[in-house]
Image (cartoon, helix red, strand yellow):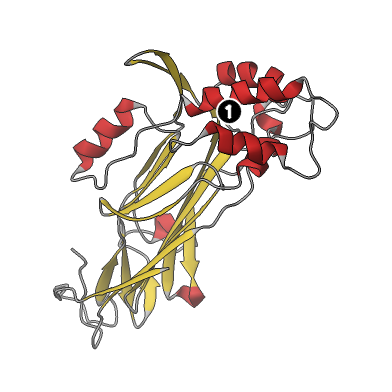
Amino acid sequence: MFVATALITATLLTSSASSDEKPTHEIRAQDIKVVAHIRSYDPRVLYNELRSLQPNPWAGEPWRWPAIMAAVTGMSLSTNPEPPARFSDEKSWRDYVAGKDYRGALHLGSFTAQCRAGQVVPRAGHADDGSYASYTSVSSDHDLGYTRYLVAGPVRLFGDGEAIPESNFRQGTTGGLTRGGQCLAVTERRAVRMSTLAQDSTFPLYGIDAPYIWIVATNEICCDGTRTVTVNRSTFPTHRLYLDGELVDEREQADWGRFIVSGGEKGRRYDAAHAQRVPAGQGMQVVSRVVVQDEMVVAAR
C-alpha cells in the first residue's frame, strides 16, 4: 500500500449564511484510470505450468498437449505493448483508448464532497436519499477491451470483448456514505471476456471455456482529509493504476494455470450470463491525505 501526504492550499467557501448551515470545506477525490493488458510472456512457461497442475484436467489426454501448446503460443502473439507511464491530459487518455491495444480500460473521474462538522453533507438542491448522487456528481467511462489478433507484420485486427450481463456481475457506478457519514465512497465495477471469435478458436484446444476478467475500483474521500483508492481485480491480466494521470501502482498477471482452468466445467460452453469469473488477484490501495485545520476549507488541486 502506497501512502502519500500532501499539504493543500486552503480556500474559504464564501456564503452569506452562517457556518453551521453551509459546508465549511470541500475534499476532492483523485481521478482514477485502470488499464488491463496482457504483458509479453514466454509460452513455454505457461505450458509447463499447465502441465504441472494438480489435479490436471487434461490427465489421460496426451493428444491434447500439442493443441494446448498451440493455444498458449497463439495468445503470446496477441500480447499488448506496455501502456504509457502517464496520461498528461484527457486527450492522451482518449487517444490511448481509441488505439484498442489493451484488454480493458476503466475511468472514474474526480469528484468532491462537501463537509460540515466532520460529516459529508448533501450538495445544494439535493435531498439526502442515501445515494452518492445526493452528495456529488461523478463521471465515468469504460471500454470492454479487445482481443488482439496478429495477422501479418504490423497489421493488427481487434475483436471486441464480450460484455458480461448484469445478472452475472453487478456493473456500473454505485456509492454512498461510509464510516458513519464521515466519508463518501464511489465504486465502478466492470467485467469482460475475450471476443467470441477467440472463444471459438481456443475452446477446441483447451476444452475449457473463456472466463471473464474484472475490475472493481473504489474512491473514498473523508472529511478529515483522508483519500483512499482501492482496486480489486482478477489475477489475470496485468493491471495498471493511474491517479490524476500518473502511474502509481501495477499488479503483474499471475496464476496462469488457475486463469486457464477457471473457465468452468471441462467440455462445457457457457453463454455470457453464466460465464465463470477469473479468481481474484492481489489488489492495489493508495492512501493520500490533505490537511484540514479548524474546519478551514481544503480544496484539492
Please identify the quarter of the rendering in which residue 114 is found: bottom left
Q: Position of residue 117 (x, y in %)?
A: 34, 83
Task: Judge whether 50 appears above or below 208 on screen.
Answer: below
- The answer to whether residue 131 shows anywhere in this view is no
Query: Callout 1: 10 Å neighbours few (<14), some, many (20+)?
Result: many
Instruction: Point out the image quarter for the N terminus.
Output: bottom left
Q: Nearer the viewer, residue 244 or 180?
A: 244
Residue extending furthest toward the right: 60
| Amino acid carrying mark 1 in the image | Val
Instruction: Point out the image quarter for the C terminus.
Output: bottom left
Q: Secondary structure at mark 1?
A: helix
Image mark count: 1
Q: Nearer the viewer, residue 69 or 254?
A: 69
- The answer to whether residue 185 shows anywhere in this view is yes
Please identify the quarter of the rendering in which residue 50 is found: top right
Q: Quick check: 197 left or right of 49? A: left
Residue extending furthest toward the bottom: 294
Q: Nearer the viewer, residue 248 or 296?
A: 248
Residue at the spot x=66%, y=25% of the render?
A: 68
Residue at the spot x=24%, y=81% of the render?
A: 19
Q: Position of residue 184 (x, y in %)?
A: 42, 66
Q: Position of residue 210 (x, y in %)?
A: 64, 30
Residue at the spot x=68%, y=33% of the render?
A: 275
Q: Which residue is mark 1?
A: 72
Please identify the quarter of the rendering in which residue 183 is found: bottom left
Q: Position of residue 208 (x, y in %)?
A: 72, 28
Residue extending furthest toward the top: 152
